[in-house]
Amino acid sequence: MIKPFKVVFAFLLLFSITPISFSGTKENLNGKAKLIIMFIVDGLRPDLINQEDTPNIYELMQDGVFFEKSHAVFPTVTRVNSAAVATASYPVNSGIVSNSIFIPEIDSTSSFSTGDYRNLQVLNDLTNGNLLLSKTWAQRLVEKGFNPAAISSGSTGSAFLLNYHALQGKGVLINGWFEPDSVVAFPKEVNDRIIQKIGPAPNVSKDPDYNEKVNWTTRVFTDYLLEEQKPDVIYCWITEPDHTQHHYGIGAPQTQVTIRNSDRNIGLIIQKIKELGLYSETDIFVTSDHGFSTYNYSVNVESELIKAGLKKSHESGDVVLASSGQSVLIHIKDRKKEKIEEVVNYFQDQKWVDVIFTAGQGSAPQNFQGWIEGTFSLGLIHLPDEGRGPDILITFRWSSQENEYGYRGTDYSNSGGQTGPRTGTSGGHGGMGPWTVRNTMIAWGIDFKSGVKSQVPAANLDFTATILALKNIPFDSGIQGRILDEALKTGPDIEKIPVETKLLTVQKGKQKAVVQISIVGKHWYIDKSWRMVNGE
């Protein structure tokens, strides 16, 4: 855990934010739902949803709006997307740029994990409460007199990002593993009541069955939140199948067990809503923070840089890495341009590197090139190139090959071990291949169309923008998500929404890199990227 420092500083985002634009719906939608629930099912690919394994999610998908061109926010990792969902904004606005973050005022030689809420508390204290650089959904709702609640069976860090202002009594935040046996929620009165009524969360350090985490969290949801707290809007983070897929892979028998259990728990919550007479006045969203792919090659990027003479040692602060698994953020001391160019040139010669991003030369996506030849701009992928942003971001190679269970998508990944091929079916996310970018997105309820499949591109942060609009929350430049008006009963015909797909290219010598984006109005989504050398 990070040691606190008596330093106060502010992060300034020196990035011009694209003006908010919608497809035609006003911000005030006057939604009819008395209860809104968003389920974030960690790591759930849409091709894992079927009538046999996930009957409850499948029914919502069939009866509601299923977004067939859905997107996770890049980097496609948990805490980046937790922050995006919490703020309806991209990393350039939220300030959470990776699963690990480099803050030199905290540690000048290494990044730290955002998975532990205590690390995030240090950053929050250091920035005078500006852990996130945009207002959260919960803050905005509390300001208008609503009662929001976030409940999570995931990491304490991803939970904390959803509503860390609950520590000051703004809404509710529940996670059974903040401090096992003693702190399972904020504020204190909520914590005490949950322990009294439900009991402490299971000790997963002794029992590795993460299904029990999901089960305990659901009991708190049904028996405390819905019965006693009665929130207007609830964000519910379900940690499986992510944890099991990391260990056993997509489609593995162990993974299928966790998927069925997560769906069962969603069914229990829906049943409770019916018992309370709220079902016909509810909106339900189901999304995931990212997709998933199978690992087939490991790269120890830090060791490779040391071997190449570009980083002095594992302990040195001249080059610091912040890893998101299938992508890596690189920070150069004092942002020295000559050193940045030297490192980029090295990466461009490595077969394991795919597409590279550096600081931009204008507003994206019109100006999408990075300042170094053959690179794209960080602004194109909604990342800052100042403050918490990196000097360089690299992605790794991916393919559409199948794993042994028949699920497509493989990726290279950063590792602390040896560089070389990997075997087995374990996997992860963080990259820009379509199998990790593509996530699950379903909208169902009194305010939404029924039995519709949408080909209009969307991302999970758009759900939060839509929820805020349904609750008539005013928008400002901190909200970058798009209101999904085409999915609303009162919205336009989905088939009449203009969508544009573009292939953006940069080139250096015989190397050509491509980023595919989809555009709806003034909103753009990153579909995938890849690099070709000599046309391959």
Image (tube, rainbow, N blue to C red):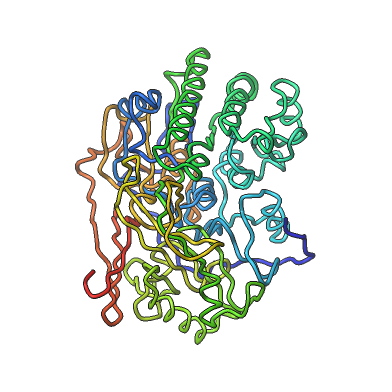
Coordinates of residue 429 in the picture (x, y in percent): 45, 52
Using the image as rendered, state which of residue 504 and residue 114 is in the foreground. Answer: 114
Q: Which residue of the protein is positioned furthest toward the bottom in this rendering?
A: 338
Residue at x-position 45% and y-position 55%:
430
Residue 87 is left or right of residue 59, and the answer is: right
Tell me the residue at 36%/35% (across/down): 48
Closest to the observer, 172 or 72: 72
Q: Residue furthest right?
A: 6
Quadrant position of the N terminus in the picture:
bottom right
Looking at the image, which is closer to me, 235 or 113?
113
Residue 443 visible in rendering: yes
What is the tally of numbered marks visible in this picture? 0
Find residue 512 and report its image quarter.
bottom left
Task: Tell me which corner region of the image, top left, top right, bottom left or bottom right, holds residue 180.
Answer: top right
Quarter assignment of residue 521: bottom left
* In this picture, residue 179 sits left or right of residue 492: right
Q: Quadrant of the C terminus?
A: bottom left
Residue at 53% from the left image edge and 78% from the top image edge: 307
> Looking at the image, is 370 positioned above or below residue 49?
below
533 lies above or below 216: below
In depth, the one of 421 and 76 nearer the eye is 421
Whole-percent x and y of residue 425?
42, 46
Q: Is residue 90 left or right of residue 185?
A: left
Q: Vertical placement of 265 versus 116: above or below? A: above
Report if residue 523 is visible in the image.
Answer: no
Instruction: Give x and y (percent) for residue 501.
Output: 24, 57
**Residue 246 % position (x, y):** 49, 45
